[in-house]
Image (spheres, rainbow, N blue to C red):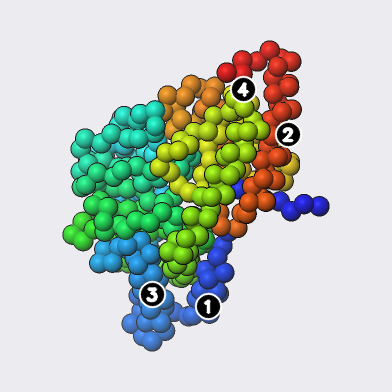
Amino acid sequence: MTARLYLDWNASTPLRPEARAAMLAAMDVTGNASSIHAEGRGVRAIIERARAQVAAALGAEGADIVFTSGATEAAALACAGRGLHCAAVEHDAVAAWCAVDLPVDAAGRVTVTQPRGSALQLANSETGIVQDLPEGLAVSDLTQAFGKLPFAFNWLGCDAGLVSAHKLGGPKGVGALALRPGIDLTAQIRGGGQEMGRRAGTENVIGIAGFGAAAEAAARDLANGVWDAVAEVRNSLEQALEAECPGTILVAKGRPRLPNTISLIAPAWKGETQVMAMDLAGFAVSAGSACASGKVSVSRVLTSMGFDQGQAGSALRVSIGPGVGEDDAMRFAQAYARAWGRARDRQKQAGADLR
């Protein structure tokens, strides 16, 4: 039996062995990081080592790194009560705190006229499209770009950046907010002085240790060209899908985007149906952002780019990683083409509009 193939890396990545080892080691350490005795200092050392690892990987040396339960909490800490504006391409975790009114063009690029009052992601989880961040931006969601694209928080010119561990091989349930020195935010979780008074509660030491190790390993992979090789596999997969499935739309092909992401529209074939067909064939893919799965509404990312409701509802996201080779990609392309052909035949029999 052929092994299943995981092609949903933008939703969550496999746990790196370095992260697993760091977490197992942290499990054996007793103490509370807020205690001043030797045991407490030992726990504090684990947290501060991870903080330094995340800062180095993020290019945020000298910035404040605040550990959170994930990028969603980091977004709340960065955005709550600030009256920020964002575009419809933003993740729900950011859009929930903003006025969603910034314009998006057909290429998925966002126009920001008042950076100090705006939030703008560096890369989109559904399409992979990379934005040019304006100087002085208030908040940027760096979650998808972190570990996949070469950038440094200190060079971006934004006040705050959100990241999450499980998008780069770390554990789920831990993230961080990077803050430019001098930026002061109101704590959303109160009750203690942890994380420089910005996030109360005993630290998730095990998760933080795994995050630090994963970030360090991710930075090493990026420097060694691992994601350049991923982009080559992605490009080959796109070519195969174009050849085998004429009439499908490859969103953002040829535009600046993440090296691993394909957004594919197969008109009149619902994205959820595509996901189920591929799941039965042994492939894990998604119809868009994992956090939006199960919702009745179609992708606002695609509709904001000018795709109609039918097209946006017929989108599939394929996101690969370093563990996916050329043979794996071709195996998926062949399976998808077979399922697409069967769906196409059913659509024609039903007289569906296949434009």
Residue type at numbered disc 1: Ala
Which of the two marks, 2 or 1, is nearer to us in this view? 2
Q: Which amino acid is tagged 3?
A: Arg
- Identify the element where label 4 is drawn: loop
Cα distance between the residues tagged 4 and 2: 16 Å
Disc 2 target residue: 338
Q: Which residue is mark 1?
A: 25
Labels 2 and 3: the sequence-earlier one: 3
Image location of residue 240, percent across then percent down: 62, 39
Residue 322: name its quadrant: bottom right
> Residue at left 30%, top 62%?
60
The label on residue 49 is 3
For numbered disc 1, what is the local secondary structure? Answer: helix
Confirm whether residue 142 shows in the render.
yes
**Disc 2 and disc 1: Cα gap in Å?**
47 Å
Q: Is residue 16 left or right of residue 257?
A: right
In the image, residue 158 lies at what x, y percent?
A: 25, 51
**Residues tagged 1 and 4 counted as in contact (Cβ below 8 A):** no
* Mark closer to the chain start, 2 or 1: 1
Q: Which residue is mark 4?
A: 268
As drawn, the residue found furthest toward the left would be 182
Residue 45 point in image, percent of width and height: 38, 78
Query: Residue lying furthest top in this view?
Result: 351
